[in-house]
Image (tube, helix red, strand yellow):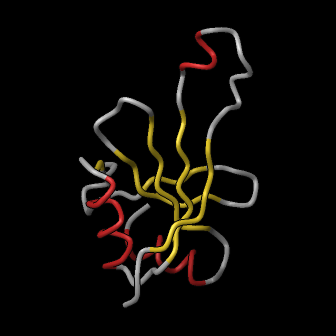
Amino acid sequence: MRKDEFKNQIERHLLTPTIFGYADANHYLVGAEDEDGNFYSLSDEQDKIMVFNSMFEAETCLKSLGFTRASLHFQTAYDEMIGNDKSSDTRITISLGEQ
């Protein structure tokens, strides 16, 4: 989803700005989730999914679009590897600071 559509969908309260990260990964995805948990990645002008090298870069992208809060969705495979429930992901709301 390109930036214009991304921003429009969030401003209409259809989607929630979201940063997606994985344990031990050196990249983050920025996108938005709907109320069913479907994730829509932010893409550039060539429709290539945007990947960020740090949490700071991901936050800066959302802040540059005018957002002050986002959902952080963080997953790890470690619990699943030792037989625990695979649904052990973390979702929290983070502040991106004031505009």
The residue sitting at 54% across, 19% down in the picture is: 78
The residue sitting at 67% across, 73% down in the picture is: 14
| Quadrant in the picture for residue 2 | bottom left
Q: In this orientation, which residue lies closer to the viewer: 46 or 57?
A: 57
Most extreme residue toward the top, as rendered? 82
Picture layout, residue 67 above or below residue 36: below
Most extreme residue toward the bottom, as rendered? 99
Picture layout, residue 37 above or below residue 75: below
Picture layout, residue 82 above or below residue 15: above
The residue sitting at 42% across, 74% down in the picture is: 96
Q: In this orientation, which residue lies closer to the viewer: 41 or 66?
A: 66
| Quadrant in the picture for residue 98 | bottom left
**How many numbered discs?**
0
Residue 77 appears at what percent x and percent y?
54, 22
Residue 79 appears at what percent x and percent y?
62, 19
* Left or right: 2 as drawn, with respect to 94: left
Q: Quadrant of the N terminus?
A: bottom left
The residue sitting at 57% across, 50% down in the picture is: 39
Q: Quadrant of the C terminus?
A: bottom left
Residue 15 appears at what percent x and percent y?
62, 68
* Left or right: 82 as drawn, with respect to 43: right
